[in-house]
Amino acid sequence: MHWTVYLAGEIHSDWRHQLQNACQQLNLPVTLTAPVTDHAASDDCGVAILGPETDPFWHDHKSAKLNAIRTRTLIQSCDLLVVRFGDKYRQWNAAFDAGQALALNKPIIVMHDPALRHALKEIDAAALAVVQTPQEVADILNYVINAALDQSPT
């Protein structure tokens, strides 16, 4: 079976690339999808496509709606959602994506540093796994897809 895994959350590190490499090393039958991770493009797509706005609210509103077309569609079509919370920014969108996935009865894996446990306790409680690294996500995928505990070398 081929799985589609949506990678929500933090866009300021290479965790998606690390996970992709780990999945390739394990030869997992997965397609990884994600939101637009170019921060400037994501912030400005609305005015770039639909025209300028003088009010920052409408500038953001246009972009949020266009980005929602992608995120909602990809979350609805995924088999599993992985959401990463970084420590640098408040990631309301990541929590929102996790909530959408939960409402759609999608399995959720949450990834974050242990220092964020208290702040994310409700999201962690809704997840089926809470991890710290992309390798742990790949190992979980290997187990649930292949029923295998073989882990890649570290």
Image (cartoon, rainbow, N blue to C red):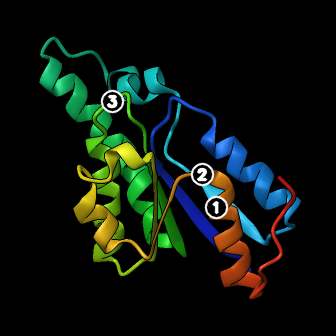
Q: Alpha-carbon distance for marks 2 and 1?
A: 5 Å
From the viewer's perspective, is 39 left or right of 29?
Answer: left
Q: Alpha-carbon distance for marks 3 and 1?
A: 23 Å
The secondary structure type at the circle numbered 3 is loop
Instruction: Name which quarter of the figure residue 87 lies in.
Output: top left
Q: Residues within 10 Å of mark 1 (few under 14, many from 20)?
A: some
Q: Which amino acid does label 2 sit on?
A: Thr
Disc 2 target residue: 133
Judged by depth in the image, the label closer to the viewer, 2 or 3, is 2
Q: Which mark is residue 89?
A: 3
Badge 2 or badge 3: first in the primary sequence: 3
Give the residue furthest to the top.
54
Residue drawn at the location 52% of the way across and 72% of the way down: 80
From the viewer's perspective, is 119 left or right of 81?
Answer: left
From the viewer's perspective, is 92 left or right of 26?
Answer: left
Disc 1 target residue: 136
Q: What residue type is labelled 1?
A: Glu
Residue 78 visible in rendering: no
Residue drawn at the location 52% of the way across and 28% of the way down: 38
Residue 89 image position (x, y, % from top left): 33, 30
Contact between labelled residues 1 and 2, with CB atoms less than 8 Å apart? yes
Residue 85 image position (x, y, % from top left): 40, 45
* Total numbered labels: 3
